[in-house]
Each structure stands twice: as structure tokens, then as C-alpha cells.
Image: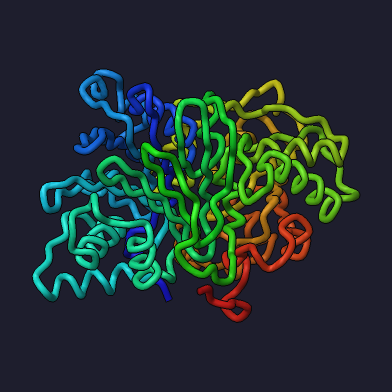
Amino acid sequence: MFNFSEINEECGVFGGWCPQKNIAQYIKCGLLKLQHRGQESAGISCGNEFQKIVKNKGLVNLALENSLLKNIEGNFGIGHVRYSTFGDDRKENIQPLKVTYTGEDVSLVHNGNVAQAKKIREKFERIGEVFLSSSDSEVILKRLIFSLKKKPSLWTFEEVGKCLKENFSDGAYCILLYLPNRIMAFRDNFGYRPLMFAKCEEGYFVASEDVAFYGLNVEELTEIKPAYGVEITKEGYEIKQFAQSKNVCQCVFEQIYFASPASNIFSKNVYGTRVKLGKILFETVDKDFSADVVIPVMDSGLGCAIGYSQASNIPFHLGLIRNSWMERSFIQPNQEKRTLNVRQKFIPIKQVIENKKVVLIDDSLVRGTTSREIISMLKCCGAKEVHMRSVSPKIINTCSWGVDIPTREELVSYKKTDKEIAQQIGADSVKFLPLEKLSEVFRGDVWCKKCFKGVEDEVFLP
């Protein structure tokens, strides 16, 4: 099984070419729209033949403030927002990673996890290679340089794709490479993570989600298929295959939690999916249930609560106001930060809550940290009852592919009944969407649902 002492990442990437203007501000705007995917650090590498980097800890507007970007310019570039799932927030791990090889610069950003990274790192270390970070991304970049052994300007899309196929075929990743006057992007064989391409009036761009392109004048929008990528140069762009796609296995958590509700991920609108999940939740587990008010856990629970309210005719209210300046609690790197984050992030509205029987709707229950703190807040504001509902099935297994789902023993639902979970988080009741009902929304065998299945049911992928 996967060793969770390693670094996994669920991040956001953006890059491309802008012929008429400096691309740095376009990248910053794209990263701002991907801020929900990573709030630990942000970085940009841009230029033409030579590359300049700005990267720092913190949210995009702080890490990439305009005063820092005034001396960074060029028509090509890539950017990254990072969330480390184990809490290693050393500056060396902030992306993009850039090296100079044979007098030429090459930068890389990466979203996901590569299973072979640890073994490849150990092989390099045995021959005397030194790593400056603990990130998988440095392993990928070093493997490419070691395999191709020539100036980055001479690397071809086919050669890079072959190296990824031969060394990282069991990974879940989207990779953006910035070579002299070129951008290359690659999506893994399984398609765990989304990758979108946009042809715009302003240029050619690639990003983790199509929400990153809002504000640009998009002419064509394409989802990069698994085992495909895109090469962007001054002469144009080409989308092409670099490997054989394996058992396509898209992460359901992208739709349920990570992605922006404005995005279309894996050919499905995220907001529409969440509304539908909320409706199915009520119709499946609460058909005869009544309450005074439906309250969402913002932000990813919003669409789910709207769907639940529509199906149940229980009034919907924003009983919790989210502090927009606070990071998402799930992607905080340790428990202490997550608990403090929840207390600072949510402001309850007493007039909505007091003397009410509340149905609290969230996208999922992982550790129970957020739910326990919020339920305590609601009861302190005078809620008569708080009934917790999750549009995800019980999460009872870990994730190997870059989502911060901890050891099974840390999972609030692991080996517990609904009643035991309710007692642990302080709710009057807890119910989950059954796994078979989740399949009504995520049909077919192209979805990864490993986190909802016990070890005895697990078909390990890849």
C-alpha cells in the first residue's frame, strides 16, 4: 500500500502563450480562479528563451503581489497553486520548479501523485544525485533530464511523453513543462485529474479547470483526454496522444469537493452535479423526514443543500456565513490548523438557527473536524436539533492519488455506525448517500470510488 509519509498534491496548474502582452498577469488571474485547489503557496515562471520565477507561501494575491511581478515578463509561462497533503510546506517544495541544464532553463508544475517517485528518487540517490525538495515534481524533472540528456530546446513532445509513459505510467498527474519558447502539457493514462485547453483571442492556455479561462475571450474549449497532451509554440498548438490510455478512472472528489461549482469537470457541470446529489440524498434517506431549515456547509455543500431543499420543501437558508479570506479546512496540512481554521472561517447567524431543527448538508465527512466544530457552533446559537447529512457515501478508505484522506483510523466513518459517528461529532443524527445511489450520478466504470470502499472490496488501481 501507499506510504502516506510521502508528499501527495491536489493542486492547480495554469500556463500558456500570449503573443501580444506579458503573460504574467494572465497566469495570476488564472491562478486566482484556481485558488480553491491550493492555498498553501503559489508561483509563476515566465519569459521566452530565459525564465524568471516568482513564488512564495500564501494565497495568490499575497504570494504574487503586483510589486513582485513588475520585473517578470514574457509571452510564455506556467503557474501553480499548491496544497500539500502531508504538511511539508518548505519553500523548496513551492512550484514551479526550475533548473538550468546545458545553459537553458526548464520549469515544471505538477498536479497529482506518481507512484514510482519514491523508487526513482532512491535510485538517483544511490548514484549520488541530490534532491532539494521532497516533492514528486523534482523527481519527474530530474528523470526527464537524465533520460533525454540534451538541451531542453531540443526535447520533443514525443520524447517527453515516452519518458513519462516508461517511468510514471502508474501515476495520477497533470504536468506542465515550460521549455525555451514552448509549453508542453500531459495528462496521465488514467485521467484521475482534469486538464483543459482553451484557444482564446489572447493566446493558447491550459489549466486544471475551465473556470480558469473565465475573463478570456475563449474561441475553442477542449478537455485533454487521458494519455493525451498539448504542445504550444509561437506557430500554434497541437493536441496529441503520448501513451495508451489505461482503465480510465476519474476522481469523484473533483466533482464533489475540489472543483469550482462554475467548472465543467469530466464533461459534467459541477454545480449541477451537486444539486442533483442533494436531491437524491433526500429522496433516498430522508423521504419522511421533516425539519425547520436546511443549512449548507459552505462552499462545496451549497449546491447540495439547494438540491436537498428543492426535493424536501424544507426552507433553505445561509445559517453559516463563510469568511472569504480563510482557507479551505480540508486542505490544511495538520489537525491543529484545520480546527482553528473552522472556528475562524464560519460565522453563524443566530436568527436563522435559534430554536430550529436544522439539517446540515455537507459534501462529505472525512475526519469530522469541520462537522464537529460547526455543530457545536449551531447548538451554541440555540439550535434545538442538528441533523448531519453527507452527499458522499461513508469515506472508509485512504486515497493513493493526491487527495488528503488520512489513515483509515483517522477517518470518522471507519468501522463506525451512523449512531456512533453522530455521537462523535455531536449531531442528533447522521446519514450518508448510499454508494449505489452515487452511481446514479457517476455512471459506468470510469470513476474512482476507492475511498468509499473497504479493503475487502478494493480493486487497486492501477
Total tally of numbered discs in the picture: 0
Residue at 65% x, 44% y: name it.
362
Residue 126 drawn above or below residue 234? below
- Seen in the image, is 47 located left or right of residue 80? left
Q: Position of residue 206 (x, y in %)?
A: 46, 41
Would residue 4 appear left or right of 448 to someone viewing this image? Answer: left
Q: Residue at x 44, y 71 (%)?
A: 170
Residue 94, image x and y in percent? 27, 44
Between 395 and 199, the one nearer to me in the picture: 199
- Residue 361 quadrant: top right
Query: What is the x, y in percent for residue 292?
Result: 81, 33
Q: Which residue occupies the extreme right position in the image?
A: 288
396 vs 198, nearest the viewer: 198
Instruction: Please report the residue visible at 37 percent of the width from the left and 30 percent of the height from the top.
Output: 60
Answer yes or no: is residue 333 visible. Answer: no
Left or right: 77 in relation to 244: left
Q: Residue at x 22, y 43 (%)?
A: 91
Q: How is the image coloured?
A: rainbow
In the displayed structure, does residue 169 sit left or right of residue 347? left
Q: Residue furthest bottom?
A: 456
Q: List the single residue furthest toward the front.
A: 235
**Looking at the rendering, which quadrant does residue 456 occupy?**
bottom right
